[in-house]
Amino acid sequence: MDLNRYELVIFDWDGTIMDSTGLIARCIQDACREVGVPVPSDEDARWVIGLGASASVRYVAPTLPADRHAEFANRYRSHYLSREHEAPLFDGIPELLAELRSRERRLAVATGKSRRGLDRALEASGLAPHFEASRCADEGFAKPHPGMLLALLDATGVAPSRALMIGDTTHDLELAANAGVDAVGVTYGAHAGELLRERPSRHLAANVEELRRWLALHA
């Protein structure tokens, strides 16, 4: 047991805190259909979740000319904004965050969402008071570049060895490795367990309750 090892616990949002990956994938597919490019599979649409907007468009719509990327982004955004209320928090997330706070753990968010998107989600979910800091893909380098985590460490004054990243994609685990931060993966989000097992992590949790139990012992 290494209780009290981590001072700062950093969460990804989509697919880790919020059950939104299916909705995001469908909105990506709808946008592809509307701009006239091949519609990606569910797996391919889910693979880009957590990346920045430009990298996502290049992956899911590689034949789309660069001068139409903004059109794609606008169509995706329109679909998502009209339906984002459909995405709930994963069961047990509010209780998990409250438990971590009760043990004086500091919490932050590192997400591929835009700042406006994260702020909307924080307000709508009621979770904003739990988090003292957050960084988004449109505020600097997107995942898996370490800049997002390094900015959070700088803002909170926490050393890499005292921070833990939690996320549902290989992008999250690579982000943590690139920043010299430990990571825990969750297999209930965008990327399957077999993909996550190919990246370094301290643990892979199959559900929020398993994540809670691991954190109770190790964080």
Image (tube, rainbow, N blue to C red):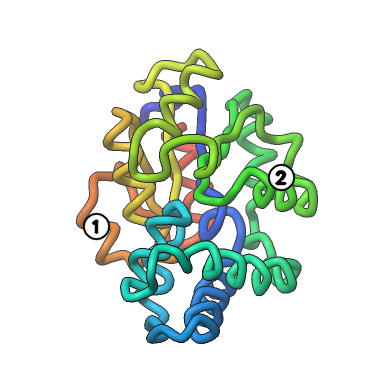
The x, y position of residue 37, in whole percent, is 41, 83
Q: Position of residue 32 (x, y in %)?
A: 48, 80
Q: Which residue occupies the foreground of this view, 28 or 215?
A: 28
Of mark 2 and mark 1, the one earlier in the sequence is: 2
Question: Hey, what amino acid is under mark 1?
Answer: Arg
Identify the residue at image location x=55%, y=36%: 135
Name the residue rendered at 41%, 62% in the picture: 56
Label 1: which secondary element: loop
What's the mark number on residue 165? none
Q: Residues within 10 Å of mark 1 (few under 14, many from 20)?
A: some
Give the labeled residue for mark 1: 197
* C-alpha distance separating marks 2 and 1: 31 Å
Is residue 204 toward the left or the right of residue 210 in the image?
left
| Local crowd size for mark 2, using a 10 Å CA cut-off: few (<14), some (14–19), many (≥20) | some
Where 174 sits versus 21, above or below?
above
Q: Is residue 13 above or below residue 84?
A: above
Query: Label 2 amino acid?
Result: Asp
Q: Is residue 181 above or below residue 87?
A: above
**Which element carries disc 2, helix, strand or loop?**
helix
The spot of residue 170 in percent (x, y) is: 32, 54
Residue at the spot x=34%, y=44% of the render?
144
Q: Which residue is mark 2?
A: 119
User: Given this view, does label 2 or label 1 mark the residue nearer the observer?
Assistant: 2
Q: Quadrant of the N terminus?
A: top left
The foreground one among 118 and 209 is 118
Foreground residue among 124 and 130 = 124
Q: Residue at 29% x, 58% y: name it.
A: 196
Residue in the foreground of this view, choosing between 204 and 57: 57
Q: Indicate the quadrant where residue 190 lies.
A: bottom left
For residue 64, what is the image quadrant?
A: bottom left
